[in-house]
Amino acid sequence: MAYAPQIKIAATYMRGGTSKGVFFKLADLPVAAQVAGAARDALLLRVIGSPDPYAKQIDGMGAATSSTSKTVIVAPSTQPGHDVDYLFGQVAIDAPFVDWSGNCGNLSAAVGPFAISAGMIDGARLPRDGVATIRIWQANIGKTIIAHVPMTAGQVQETGDFELDGVTFAAAEVQLEFLDPAADEEGSEADGPANMFPTGNLVDQLEVPGVGTFSATMINAGIPTIFVNAADIGYSGSELQDAINGDAKALARFETIRAYGALRMGLIKHIDEAARRQHTPKVAFVAPPAAYTASSGKQIAAGDIDLLVRALSMGKLHHAMMGTAAVAIGTAAAIPGTLVNLAAGGGARTAVRFGHPSGTLRVGAEAVVEGGIWRVNKAIMSRSARVLMEGWVRVPGGAAGP
């Protein structure tokens, strides 16, 4: 029996923030995978090594965590005033699907550097030394991200002294601005700008069969996120990964909360749909500041932070914090009365520093009231990015059609 040989596809393996993924230029993909659909999904699944019943992704580029089972497609922008279009695919580990329902805030930090290094930005507008401003259209959610990328001697500067908890080594700082991060599309009980809070409320009583009824702030900014108080679900807010990821009953309980929250937010029409939408919404729990020991052994004092936040991604407690969830945290913290704001002490604020399992992170957001409706013009945070490997990935022929 004859077997098709492997094909090779130009690709770059990059770290962005506390995530890493395989980056492609749209034009480098096989023709069948240059458009959304089954062929593209099949290709990306094979690149990453999914679905894998062993949950290891040994036969692919993934590393079997939500932070590393990721793909990015970058193309010249179709939107006026933007440099590139950025499409993010969260690849399921043990199931045959790619979730396109949201953005990856961490990998957003790598999109500008990738676009520059791949020759997708007009060299005439790039400083030889200084900071390049790259306008990115986030195609999954239809939002603008502005990346401020450091340049040295005409090249992207990757090395530096910026430290990011959750990343072992220092690197160059990439500042990101997420413009108008509130969603304005998916279903809700309120119209227009109030879609940032799909139910129209800053706090709701969320009824979850088999779990209970408790307060929740459900916000769609950065990424749809369900915030609950840690104490209401039996936690302190200072937990590390092992305390939750090794508890199958706890993970099932969080998934149930996520599913019923998605239904209440209008993201799904039937509870069973949640299983096919693993990337969104996120579930996070918050608590007032308290001292704890981070996963690296670093001591975090209560005075170092404004609040504690722990978040789950793809069914597991995240080792640090998803970038998009950080946008949701910063946005919610800026709006008096949300659970995030109350955990941080309440009142008006334009920035918040929160404690996560790997350490701390600061995110800023400015909220204003217009016509009785809360709006956030932008959220700001810093990340770093670095090329880990570049060249070609190889997949068996026929993985994405002809």
Image (tube, rainbow, N blue to C red):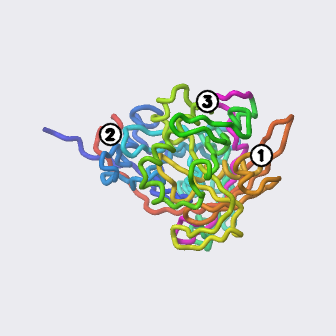
Q: In this view, does 179 lie to the left or right of 165?
A: right
Q: Earlier in the sequence, mark 3 or mark 2?
A: 3
**Residue at figure coordinates x 66%, y 48% from the top left:** 328
Q: Earlier in the sequence, mark 1 or mark 2?
A: 1
Residue toward you, 290 or 182: 290
Residue sticking out furthest to the right:
371
**Residue at figure coordinates x 69%, y 37% from the top left:** 204
Question: As displayed, is residue 384 above or below residue 100?
Answer: below
> Disc 3 and disc 1: Cα gap in Å?
22 Å
Q: What stretch is highlighted in magenta?
A: 165-191
Question: As displayed, is residue 301 above or below residue 188?
Answer: below
**Residue 266 numbered tag:** 3
The amino acid type found where label 3 is placed reads Gly
Residue underneath mark 1: 337
The amino acid type found where label 2 is placed reads Ala
Question: As displayed, is residue 263 above or below residue 313?
Answer: above
Q: Earlier in the sequence, mark 3 or mark 1?
A: 3
Q: In this view, does 192 lie to the left or right of 74?
A: right
Element type where label 3 sits in the image:
loop
Instruction: Please provide percent x and percent y for residue 312.
Output: 53, 50
Classify 10 Å Cα crowding around label 3: few (below 14), some (14-19), many (20 and above): some
Residue underneath mark 2: 399
The magenta stretch spans residue 167: yes
